[in-house]
Amino acid sequence: GAVVSQHPSWVICKSGTSVKIECRSLDFQATTMFWYRQFPKQSLMLMATSNEGSKATYEQGVEKDKFLINHASLTLSTLTVTSAHPEDSSFYICSATFLDSGTYNEQFFGPGTRLTVL
Amino acid sequence: AQSVTQLGSHVSVSEGALVLLRCNYSSSVPPYLFWYVQYPNQGLQLLLKYTSAATLVKGINGFEAEFKKSETSFHLTKPSAHMSDAAEYFCAVSSGGYQKVTFGTGTKLQVIP
């Protein structure tokens, strides 16, 4: 149980275009979803936290107009990289947590999406 | 505030040898601690977690970690390394509930045949 999927697994796009990445919780309702960015050989950096039906909370330094997050349902969150540039190339990972997680914040991670901007 | 420090960005061990990956944490409240493993171009898989119950936590694939409050440590160990253990390992800390998880910088484990 607690499976999270991402689509696409990899995407190549031209500079200036927008790219949408989907994150789905397959067998549970995710009250909260997180979006991370991971540069090569580095750790995960939290970009934003999204709760179903409300605006995402962005971490300091993350441009909310560039990285649009929508959490329209309890099983789907999307990250749209608008007007992508080569410096946006990275590995994007989402995670999700749900009401029955108890007192600890166990997050279930998706497999990641590799974005390459040419 | 919370943070995690992983000592050693790269660790090499021989197959069959003890694996020890170090993690020290800082947290203003009782922490929840995690170890994740990441294989190339994949997401994170939870190895084990400490949630204020037993201080010695056993996880998957033969890994275990011990929470030592006096040392603010949560080191990951495995008695005998296997080739399939070669991966990146991340220690993480959270203050619980829906608070965000903070990850360490990761330790890449190399297993030498």
Image (cartoon, rainbow, N blue to C red):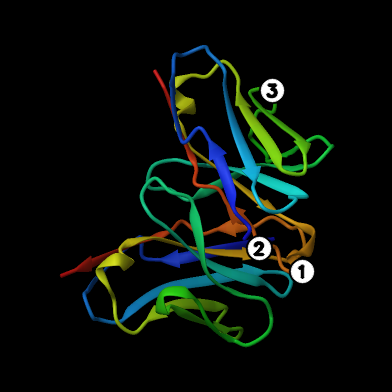
Q: Which residue is mark 2?
A: A106
In the figure, A96 relative to A115: above or below? below
* Residue on which the image places disc 1: A102
Q: Between disc 3 and disc 2, whose residue precedes?
A: 3
Residue B90, placed above or below residue A19: below
* Residue B11 visible in the current orientation: no
Q: Is residue B57 left or right of residue B76?
A: right
Label total for image: 3
Image: B111 above or below B67: above
- Secondary structure beneath dot 3 equals loop
Q: Residues within 10 Å of mark 1 (few under 14, many from 20)?
A: few
> Which mark, by number, is residue B72?
none
Task: Decide: few, some or many residues near mark 3? Use Cα within 10 Å; few <14, some 14-19, many ≥20.
Answer: few
Q: Quarter of the image containing the N terminus of chain A?
A: bottom right
Which amino acid type corresponds to the residue marked 1 in the rendered image? Gly
| Chain name for mark 1 | A
**Circle 1/circle 2 CB separation < 8 Å:** yes
The chain containing the residue under callout 3 comes to A
Q: Nearer the viewer, residue B95 or B48?
A: B48
- Seen at 39% across and 17% down, the residue is A118
| Labels 1, 3: one chain | yes
Instruction: State which tag comes first along the sequence, 1 or 3.
Output: 3
Q: Position of residue A5 (x, y in %)?
A: 57, 44
Residue at 71% from the left image edge and 53% from the top image edge: A28
**Any mark on residue A65, and which?**
3
